[in-house]
């Protein structure tokens, strides 16, 4: 059973940024291209960007540990409409297929109840078939398409996926 550790210190933020660099560079270049991966790591998953998300935008980052090994990270963001956004859920390639992702989703679901969140939602790249299938197995459904201009000449073409928690 994995453990989740809330990210609060600058050292923990640096650990998340290092995990992002490793995981994203392994997983995403075939899906969105290396140039977009580099841009997104710099603007959205650098230590400075993560710090801003935590301090200014209400993000809660967590490290995922399998035993004493840092296996991945995720971020949740409470929404004003009574839902919770799963903004990020990334696991090292070698740690996939061991039930960690399912355990993280169960942990998040338990976190949603006392906060009054009735729905969990996320976005996932349209070309990320493995992740889409994972979320569908976990009870999420595709609720629509989202195209977001993220700057630098890049657009995120994502599915919005939702799961009702009631």
Image (tube, rainbow, N blue to C red):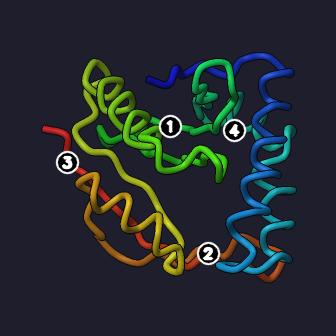
Which mark is on residue 156? Answer: 2
Q: Earlier in the sequence, mark 4 or mark 3?
A: 4
Q: Look at mark 1 in the image and give the residue it sits on.
A: 76
- Mark 2 Cα-neighbour bin, 10 Å: few <14, some 14–19, many ≥20: some
Marks counted in the figure total 4
Q: Position of residue 46 (x, y in %)?
A: 84, 46
Q: Look at mark 4 in the image and give the residue it sits on.
A: 53
* For residue 127, above or below residue 52: below
- Mark 4 Cα-neighbour bin, 10 Å: few <14, some 14–19, many ≥20: some
Residue nearer the viewer, 15 or 83 = 15
Q: CA distance from mark 2 to mark 3?
A: 24 Å
- Mark 1 Cα-neighbour bin, 10 Å: few <14, some 14–19, many ≥20: many
Q: Quadrant of the C terminus?
A: top left
Q: Look at mark 3 in the image and give the residue it sits on.
A: 164
Question: Of tags 4 and 1, which is closer to the observer?
Answer: 1
Q: Position of residue 8 (x, y in %)?
A: 71, 18
Q: Secondary structure at mark 2?
A: strand
Q: Earlier in the sequence, mark 2 or mark 3?
A: 2
Q: CA distance from mark 4 to mark 1?
A: 11 Å
Q: CA distance from mark 3 to mark 1?
A: 16 Å
Q: CA distance from mark 4 to mark 3?
A: 25 Å
* For residue 130, above or below residue 91: below
Q: Secondary structure at mark 4?
A: helix
Q: Position of residue 61 (x, y in %)?
A: 62, 31
Q: Is residue 105 left or right of residue 4?
A: left
Q: Secondary structure at mark 1?
A: strand
């Amino acid at each position: 059973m994995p453990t989740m550790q809330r990210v609060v210190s600058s050292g923990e933020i640096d650990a998340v940024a290092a995990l992002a660099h490793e995981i994203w560079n392994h997983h995403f270049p075939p899906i969105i291209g290396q140039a977009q991966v580099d841009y997104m790591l710099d603007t959205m998953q650098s230590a400075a960007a993560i710090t801003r998300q935590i301090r200014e935008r209400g993000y809660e980052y967590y490290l995922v540990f399998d035993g004493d090994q840092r296996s991945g990270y995720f971020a949740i963001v409470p929404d004003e409409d009574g839902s919770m956004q799963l903004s990020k859920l990334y696991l090292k390639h070698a740690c996939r297929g061991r039930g960690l992702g399912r355990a993280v989703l169960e942990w998040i679901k338990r976190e949603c109840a006392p906060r009054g969140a009735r729905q969990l939602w996320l976005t996932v790249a349209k070309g990320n078939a493995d992740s889409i299938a994972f979320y569908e197995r976990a009870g999420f459904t595709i609720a629509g398409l989202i195209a977001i201009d993220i700057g630098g000449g890049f657009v995120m073409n994502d599915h919005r996926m939702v799961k009702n928690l009631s």
